[in-house]
Amino acid sequence: MMERPFDLRGKGAVITGSSRGIGRAIAEALALQGANVIVSSRKLAACEEVAAAINAGEAGRATAVAASIGSKADIERLFAESVKILGGVDILVCNAASNPHYGSMSSISDEQFEKILRNNVLANHWLCQLAIPGMTARGDGSIIIISSIGGYRGSEVIGAYNISKAADMQLARGDRAAAATALRSIEAPQAPPMVRLGSRRLLGISSVRSRRWSRGRRRRWPSWSPVSRRRRPSWRGSRIVRFASTSRSTSSRISPNRRTSWR
C-alpha cells in the first residue's frame, strides 16, 4: 500500500481553477493523499479531463463541477454541489484568479479593475463565508488562499493584480481572527514568502501564491524577484498538502507563533 505521510483519506476538498497549472497539481496532490476532490473551473470538459486522470489512480476520487468565480450564484451552486457530493468540505483551496490588464495603473479601465477585485478577492470571500461555518462547527478544516509575493511589491505592469493579492493576505488574516473565538488556534501559512501566523492548527486559513507570468511576456525570470527562480506546479501541490493536513508530523514542523517574511 502506498505510504501517505499526510493522510487525507475521508477528507473532502474543493479547488477552484484546478483544470490546469497549479490548481491541477494541487488537486492531484490532495487526491494522492486520499482526499476526494472537486475539480472546478469555467470549462466542464477541462475539469472532466483532470477528474478522469485522478480517478485512474488508486487514491482519492475526483468529480468535475464547472463554475465561474465571477458569479456569486455559480459559487453558491459549486459549494452546494460539493457538500452533496463530498458530504462536507474539509479543505478549500481558493486558487482561481484573473488578470485582464498588463500595463500601468493609469491605463487600467474600471471594468478591468473591478474584474480583478471580484475574481481574485470577492470570490474568495464568498467561498470562505460558505466554508467557515461548517469547519468551525466541526472544529476542523483548512482554507488555503493562493496569494502572491506581488502582494508585497509595487509593479509597473501588474499593479492591480498585486493589490488583489495583498487583499487576499488580509482576507486570510481577517477570517482567521473572526474564527478564533470558536477555535483555540489557527495557522495561516503563506508562500512565497512563507509567513506563518499562529500555532497548531484546528482550522487553517492560509494564503499562498507563486508568481505566474503570461506566456511569451517574460522569457527570463526578473532579476529583482526575491524568489530568484521558478517553481514547478507539483512543488506547490506538495506544499498545499502539508497545509491541508491535520497530521501531527505537519504541526510538529511549525514553530508556535513564528512569523517569517521576505523583504
Image: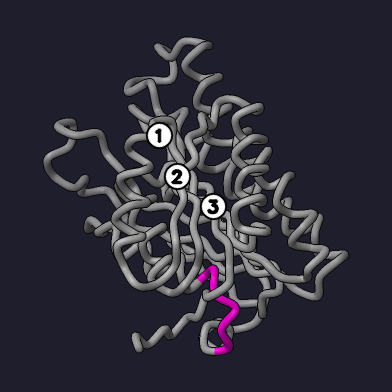
Q: Which residue is drawn at 35% across and 72% down?
A: 58
Q: Distance between the residues labelled 1 and 2?
A: 7 Å
Q: Name the residue under label 2.
A: 64
Residue 128 screen position, x and y as percent: 68, 47
Q: Provide residue 23's location: percent of width, then percent of height.
A: 39, 50
Vertical placement of 43 versus 56: above or below?
Answer: above
Quarter of the C terminus within the rendering: bottom left
Task: Looking at the picture, tell me which residue is in the foreground, 35 or 255.
Answer: 35
Secondary structure beneath disc 1? helix
Q: Is residue 133 above or below residue 111?
A: below
Q: Does the magenta stretch include residue 168?
A: no
Can residue 246 be seen here? The reply is yes
Residue 245 part of the magenta-drawn span: yes
Task: Give left or right: position of 167 versus 174.
Answer: left
Q: Which amino acid does label 2 sit on?
A: Ala
Q: Which amino acid does label 1 sit on?
A: Leu
Residue 107 spot, x, y in % from top left: 40, 11
Residue 188 horizontal/vertical position (percent): 61, 64
Q: Mark 1 points at which residue?
A: 44
Q: In this view, does 16 lie above or below 227?
A: above
Q: Mark 3 points at which residue?
A: 14
Region in magenta? 243-248
Crowding near the residue tagged with mark 3, few <14, some 14–19, many ≥20 C-alpha atoms within 10 Å: many
In the picture provided, is 6 more to the left or to the right than 157?
right
Q: In which quarter of the image is the N terminus?
A: bottom left
Comparing 142 with 151, the one in front is 142
Please, is residue 88 above or below residue 106 in the view?
A: below
Report the residue at 58% width, 27% height from top: 118
Tell which of 151 and 52 is nearer to you: 52
